[in-house]
Amino acid sequence: MKLKALIVDDSRIMRNMVIRALNRSGLSEFEFVEAGDGAEALTLFDKEPIDIALIDWNMPNMTGIEFVRQIRAKGNTEHIPLIMVTSEKSMGKIEEALDQAGANAFICKPFTDDEIVQKLRKLVEGVVARKSQPQQTSGGGWLSRMFS
């Protein structure tokens, strides 16, 4: 099963490093969509069904943390893992991303392939499990769904 991963970073080199690490992780097969800042990522997010996003913090036009807040404010996005991949390392920034903005994980730059695997394994497994479940149909009411 292929997962669509949105990679958001103003550095092309960093986007390539994240893509390479995900490809080597063995966690899943990925199809990548790239954005150079949060504003571009927000546009792509609205156009494409994104399964997971890895986001830099410091970018022009819209920061990564602003992007995460806007995605979470849309509602019905809690099933999409949003991972900050950033050089911001202070406890205050980590707390802001995870507890206040709604990010699911925080990976500090520079990172290793092992860190990517360790931080993302459960998140990717959750996405794969969710996508593997048959879609519920809306017809028939709650009683018919109990016995299907």
Image: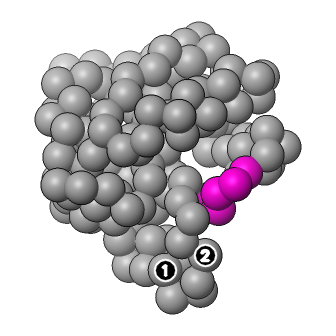
- Quote the CA–CA distance across marks 2 and 1: 7 Å
Left or right position of 51 against 26: left
Q: Residue at x 53, y 34 (%)?
A: 13
Instruction: Determine whether the residue tagged by mark 1 lies in a helix, strand or loop.
Output: helix
Place residue 121 in its image quadrant: top right
* Quadrant assignment, res 109: bottom right
State the image quarter where residue 32 is shown: top left
Which span of residues is magenta-colored?
Answer: 105-111
Q: Residue at image x 49%, y 80%?
A: 93
Quadrant in the picture for the C terminus: top left
- Image position of 63 with respect to 76: above or below: below
Please state the horizontal and vertical placement of residue 53, each as a whole percent of the image: 44, 40
Q: Is residue 32 magenta?
A: no
**Residue 12 in sight in this render:** yes
Mark 2 crowd level (few <14, some 14–19, many ≥20, 10 Å Cα)? few
Q: Is residue 110 magenta?
A: yes
Residue type pointed to by label 2: Lys
Q: Residue furthest right?
A: 114
Give, as a three-letter code, the residue at label 1: Lys
Nearest the eye: 60 or 97:
60
Q: Nearer the viewer, residue 58 or 105?
A: 58
- Is 3 positioned to the left or the right of 138 in the image? right
Query: Relative to 42, does residue 130 appear above or below in the rendering?
Result: above
Residue for badge 2: 89
Marks 2/1 in contact by CB < 8 Å: the verdict is: yes
Q: How is the image coloured?
A: one colour
Q: Is residue 54 above or below residue 103?
A: above
Residue 111 appears at what percent x and percent y?
73, 51
